[in-house]
Each structure stands twice: as C-alpha cells, then as structure tokens.
Image (tube, rainbow, N blue to C red):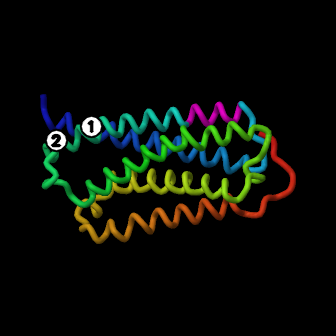
Amino acid sequence: MDMLLVTDFLRFSHLLAVCLGLGASITADLYIFNRLRTPLTREMMATLHRTHGIVWAALGLMWITGLGLLFIRTGFDPAAFTPKLIAKLGTVGLLTLNALLIGAIAMPMLEGRLGRSIAAFPTALKLRFALIGGISAASWLLALAMGVSKALARSGTEVFILMLPAAYATALVATAIVLLSRPMTGSRTA
C-alpha cells in the first residue's frame, strides 16, 4: 500500500475529527450561552449529553489517527518530536482530561440543578464552568490552528511557550466574563 495515501487518509481523518470536535464544542457553548437565564431541563441535558458524545467520538478519532501519523513521522522516537508535535500532544491530552471532567463533574453539577438557570448559580460554581469552558474553547481552537498551520510547523519552542498560555488565558477570561456578567432579569424559553 502506498504510504502517501495512508498518510493522506490519516491526515484527512485527523482534521475531520478536529472539525467535528470543535463544531460540537462550539454548538454546546452556544447552546448554553443562549440559555444562561433559562432553567435547566432534562431536554437541555439530553442535548448536552449527545453533544458530549460527539466530542468523545472526535477525540477518539483524533487519538487513533494522531498516533498513526506520529508513528509514520517519528517511529515513536522522542528525539524526532518537534516543538509543535509536543504542543499538539499536550493540547489533545488536556482536551481529553477536560472531556473527562465535563462528564464526571460538570454534567452531574448541571443535572443536580435542574429547574435553576446557570445565571443564578453561585459565583464559585460559575468560575468552575468558566475554567472548563475556557480550556475546551482554547484547546479546540489550538488543535485546529496547529493542525493546519505550516508556519507553526517551523516554529521553535519559544513560540509555543508564548502562544499556549496566551490562548488559554484569553479563553478563560472571556468565558469568565460571559458567565459572571450581571444576570438579566427574566428567563428565556428554550
């Protein structure tokens, strides 16, 4: 079998997985954002669970295809790892950990508060959601950027040392601002 075709297939599948995961993540974020003042319902939770399932499928495909590409390019020899590759592994590792936290902590927290709006949650709880949401948003966008950027492929470690914390800090602050904004009165309907 032609290795170029195998590599292209893995790369295409890998980028498709990133797009699916990013799309599902953005869909969930917008779904929640548009319902911050709406009391949580079982139907809303079912939608979030379905979306989370898509994220898990995308992550699984990312790991499978990513490890395939890693083997083709490096033979799993750490000496052959580039700064971009190390940053990608760290980002997808953090995405995977974050997905675990969403399923194990965030979803049960939301389910335990059915009938209440996220806008009415205590500040400390909203900050936890901001942390999880900010990490998710930054990680998916970074995964996409690192997957398609040729400039980043040639970048040294210093670029990633500056880029990664800046991206995460920006996403965390933006998410916290949205969640901690003064709640408006009234509620929206789904």
Query: Mark 1 to mark 2: distance in Å?
Result: 10 Å
Q: Quadrant of residue 166?
A: bottom left
* Residue 73 placement (x, y as % from top left): 16, 46
Q: Nearer the viewer, mark 1 or mark 2?
A: 2
Q: Is residue 151 left or right of residue 18?
A: left
Q: Is residue 53 above or below residue 145?
A: above
Indicate yes or no whether the magenta region holds residue 68: no
Residue identified by numbered label 1: 10
Q: Quadrant of the N terminus?
A: top left
* Residue 12 placement (x, y as % from top left): 31, 39
* Residue 180 placement (x, y as % from top left): 70, 62
Q: Which residue shows up at 70% across the image and 59% down it?
A: 123
Extent of the magenta region: 43-51
Q: Is residue 5 above or below residue 135?
A: above
Q: Which residue shows up at 27% across the image and 55% down it?
A: 86
Q: Quadrant of the C terminus?
A: top right
Q: Secondary structure at mark 2?
A: helix
- Kindly indicate whether the residue at mark 2 contacts the one at mark 1 (C-beta within 8 angstroms): yes
Please report whichever mark, 1 or 2, sits nearer to the chain's N-terminal start: 1
Residue identified by numbered label 2: 72
Q: Secondary structure at mark 1?
A: helix
Q: Amino acid at mark 1?
A: Leu
Q: Residue furthest right?
A: 186
Q: Which residue shows up at 77% across the image and 63% down it?
A: 182
Task: Please identify the dominant SS of the magenta region.
Answer: helix
Label annotation for residue 19: none
Q: Which residue shows up at 26% across the image and 35% down it?
A: 9
